[in-house]
Each structure stands twice: as structure tokens, then as C-alpha cells.
Amino acid sequence: MQTSKIVIADYDPRWPSMFEEEKNRLIKDIGQWALDIQHIGSTSVSGLGAKPVIDIMIGVRTLQEADTYCLVPVSNLGYEYIKKYEDQMPYRRYFSKSRNENVLEHHIHLVEKGSEFWVRHLAFRDYLRVNPEVAREYEQLKRNLAPQFSDGNEYAAAKTDFIKEIETKALKR
């Protein structure tokens, strides 16, 4: 059995304020280009255990504008722009920030507002927020999967069927 690097922490009530703090920093530097900034992922759902990573989704008008006006300012805030993920998701610009191994990370998903990525992620988050029994089921799945994986991409892939099922329900509402 491999050693797990995936950690599911109990819900931390500081996560929303940590998002707001980071959102305010982003607005100062790219506010004129960001149409909307949303807290997504498990840390955005009250009571839900999660990997202690604040996922931030920034909605822009076009990725061309984002490439021209947002990449450098976001990087200057301490984020690493990870271009290689564009091969898999050309409709998203991805950034990661970590202070050190023991401190919460932030991820930024920069996408066109209203895109399929934008809509799906908000629908999933909002569905979990209003369906606590589904959120508990999702947390249990994550806690069961976490010890089985040391690679974050493999862990994410293992959750895909559940997420797609919930997205389908959420988008039908």
C-alpha cells in the first residue's frame, strides 16, 4: 500500500474568509478584467471536509484578454502559472500557490464566464450547498479514496463519476 499524500481535513470555518481575503488581493490587481470571482471546490461548501486548498474561479470575458492582462499580475501575487495543463484543458488557465508544505494552498481556475467549465463548477457547488446529505456522501467518498492515492490527478479521476452524476442532477434543476 502506498503512502497517501492526499489529506482530507475537517471543515474549517476560516475557509470562506480566506477566500475573501485572496479575492480582494486579486481584485486589486486584475479587477478590471475579472467579471466575477467565485469560491468553488469543497472548501466552498459549509461543513464539508476537504483537501485544504482554496479553489478560486475567475470569470473573464475572453481567454485572449486573460492571457494578455491577467497572467503576469496573478503570477506576481505568488501564484505559479502551470501552462502544461492547457494541453488537457485549453479553455482554462491554471495557477497554484503554496506557502510551504504545512500551509493551505490556493488554486486559480481562470476561465471565460458562462463557459461550460464555469457553469458546471457553480452548479456542483450550489447543489452540494443545498443538499447536505449529498455533500456528506461526497465527503465519505473522498475520505475512502484519499488513502488509495498519492497522485492528485488520479484521486480527482476517481471522483469523476460521482461528480458528473451530481452535475447532471444540478444542471437539470
Image: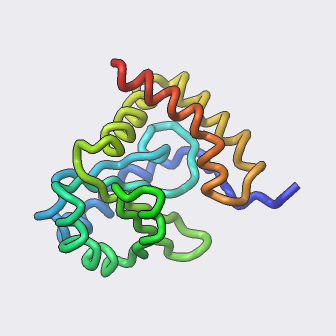
Examine the rendered structure and indicate whether residue 41 appears above or below residue 71: above
Q: x, y percentage for residue 121?
A: 38, 41
Q: Quadrant of residue 82?
A: bottom left
Residue 118 versus residue 86: which sits nearer the camera?
Answer: 86
Q: x, y percentage for residue 91?
A: 34, 55
Residue extending furthest toward the left: 32
Examine the rendered structure and indicate whether residue 163 appears above or below residue 118: above
Number of numbered labels in the structure image: 0
Please give the name of the residue rendered at 39% of the width and 25% of the height, measured from the top-left corner: 170
Residue 48 versus residue 77: which sits nearer the camera?
Answer: 77
Q: How is the image coloured?
A: rainbow
Please give the name of the residue rendered at 20% of the width and 65% of the height, measured from the top-left corner: 64
Q: Quadrant of residue 73?
A: bottom left
Q: x, y percentage for residue 78?
A: 38, 78
Q: x, y percentage for residue 83?
A: 42, 71
Residue extending furthest toward the right: 1
Residue extending furthest toward the top: 173
Drawn side of residue 125 relative to residue 145, left or right? left
Please give the name of the residue rendered at 51% of the width and 37% of the height, measured from the top-left corner: 47
Please give the name of the residue rendered at 23% of the width and 42% of the height, measured from the top-left corner: 114
Q: Look at the image and tell me in which quarter the C terminus lies.
A: top left
Q: Look at the image and tell me in which quarter the N terminus lies.
A: bottom right
Residue 163 versus residue 63: which sits nearer the camera?
Answer: 63
Q: Quadrant of residue 17?
A: bottom left
